[in-house]
Image (cartoon, rainbow, N blue to C red):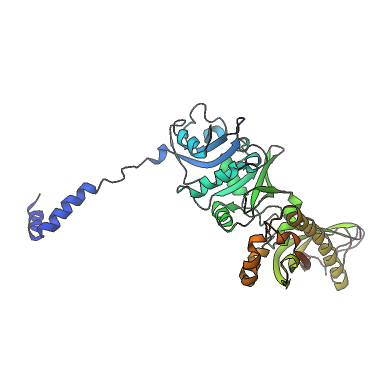
Amino acid sequence: MNKQTKKILKRMPKPLVICCCVSLLFLTSCWDRIEIEDRGFVIAIGIDLSESGQYLLTEQIAVPGGQSAQAGQGGAGGGTFLNVVGTGPSIMDIIREASAKTNRAPFYEHIKVILISKDVAKTPKFDDALDFFIRSPEMRRATKIMITEDKASDILKNTQPGATIPGLYIDKITANPYQNERIISPTLIGDINEALYQEKSFMIQHIFTKHETLDIEGAAVFHGNTTHLAGILSPEQTAGLSFLTANAKGGTISGQYHNHEISLLVKNSERKITAVDLSHPQHLKFKLDINIEGNMLETGTSINFIDTSIRSDIQKAFEKSLNKQIQETLQLIQKQYTTDIIGISDYMRIHHWDRWQQIENNWEKNNKYFKDVDIDVNTYIFIRNTGTINRTKKENDSDGRD
């Protein structure tokens, strides 16, 4: 200790010096620090049922570059990931044992996706699994949940061209609903937690293997009050739902004009809900106005878009096709599933709170008022752009530009 330091200490009050010395005992740095290269970053989790009916959990861990996967735990992706598999009666039991199966401490705060097989989703184990991940302090609210048609463990082994880690690849392709009306928006753990708290029905993205390629289309629909799987919407039904809820900001609408196939590229969609009759709980009536703007893609025949009557006929052709698709989807989710995933309950809670309090407990359960609601859907399509030409030409016509 030099002279200057001694002078400073003499000038300081003794109680302060004692406090400073005692505080040094508690400055133990990061006592639980683990070097980053020793961490096992869990990218994805797959949940299946074992032959005995227990959980079969697959944890996909990223392997740092230049390090090989531990023998027996991986085997795909050229050593870029390893899949740790375990079985047990609960998710917590399997996760606790996972640390004994790998030389890296599993780290769960960077999980991108959780894949749950349809077999699990049909059982009460689905509710238990959701409860664990919702309560886990290590789980981020932005982690995505998906339902798999195949075994979740098989999907986490499926390496695609240009992708080194299946979990990261799946995370990327979940973000394409704006380009495809057959894909719903990603479902986050936080979204499911909110839906369960409010006992609202909800949807989860659906993933499956098609010709050895991972494909995300359709949607798994769940009852909010029971968490039971109501059913899985086909890609066409999911498209109808996207337009019904005005969540379709992309995708296409097909129709028939003079026996020729025509296509519209959707650029924007809006929806307005109006309560027509709320006088009796069993005879509620609503009107849904859906406005869609888009650009012409294909015509398949000679069309003069300058003629407003022709343009109007084409718009009506699209409206007819879309109405049919929407009605088929609405019939399924209302009459068969009895799941309000189209937002009528949200509208009632916001705009007609007094009435909603009277019917809330009988909306999807007990008397199931939603099942008997009269919903009048009106679609309005506007062709905003016809491309670089105003007239399509026949085979022997000259240029169709104007």
Give the percent coordinates (x, y) of residue 209: 68, 39
Foreground: 187 or 332?
Answer: 332
Foreground: 62 or 132?
Answer: 132
Give the percent coordinates (x, y) of residue 286: 74, 68
Let me know if residue 58 appears in the view: yes
User: Which quarter of the rendering shows the C terminus?
Assistant: bottom right
Residue at (70% x, 67% y) in the render: 271
The image quadrant that residue 285 belongs to is bottom right
Let me know if residue 251 appears in the view: no
Number of numbered tags placed on the structure image? 0
Foreground: 147 or 295?
Answer: 147
Residue at (13% x, 55% y) in the render: 17
Residue at (51% x, 53% y) in the render: 141
The image quadrant that residue 35 belongs to is top left
Give the percent coordinates (x, y) of residue 107: 45, 42
Give the percent coordinates (x, y) of residue 97: 46, 33
Vertical placement of 63 versus 359: above or below? above
